[in-house]
Image: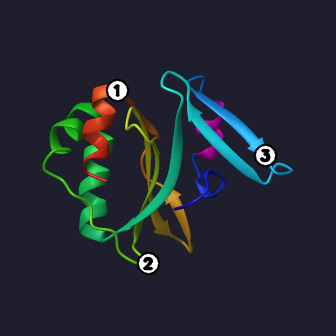
Amino acid sequence: MSTINKLQMAHTICKDARVDTRKSFLGLCTTLTYNPTQSIIDARQIELTPSEGDQLSRLMNDGRDPLLKAAASIKLHPIVNGNYKLDVCVSRDHQFVALQLLKYMQLNYEPVTDIMIFEHDEAQRVSAML
């Protein structure tokens, strides 16, 4: 599990009106809560193979509908030191999911998709592929 501060999308997620941000222990720990359900949001990073990353990149860049349709048939397989990294924030009740795909380019992970946020039924469908 990763901390929210390690994600490139951290600033955007923390500023989202649906998410409450609480800092504790001298500002070193950050806890996110999905406001409608008061569920804690966990952050993680999933590294992917080039083939899975390319497939996910195409789906995410095509929009929400293609990703939601394919979510039931996709199961991501994390690897160590992948070319792609998926930054993920998921509420513990699976009612909120935020995703951003990054690709390793020029000695750094760079975003290849915009941040996508899903709620309620859509979030449950997307979280099933994670």
Estimate how packed mark 1 is, as few (under 14), some (14 to 19) or many (20 or more) residues with alpha carbons within 10 Å.
few
**Would you say residue 96 is visible in this rendering?**
yes
Estimate how packed mark 3 is, as few (under 14), some (14 to 19) or many (20 or more) residues with alpha carbons within 10 Å.
few
Q: Residue at x 73, y 52 (%)?
A: 29
Give the total of numbered labels.
3
Q: Residue at x 28, y 60 (%)?
A: 54
Residue mark closest to the camera, 1 vs 3: 3
Mark 1 belongs to which amino acid?
A: His
Mark 1 vs 3, N-terminal side: 3
Q: Residue at x 59, y 52 (%)?
A: 8
Q: Which mark is residue 81?
A: 2
Residue mark closest to the camera, 1 vs 2: 1
Q: Which residues are magenta?
A: 10-15
Q: Which residue is mark 3?
A: 24
> For the residue labelled by badge 1, is the local secondary structure a helix, a strand or a loop?
helix
> For the residue labelled by badge 2, is the local secondary structure a helix, a strand or a loop?
loop
Mark 2 belongs to which amino acid?
A: Asn
Q: What percent of the width, then of the height, locates residue 103? A: 44, 63
**In the image, is 89 to the left or to the right of 13?**
left
Q: Give the vertical position of 12 relative to 75 (above or below).
A: above
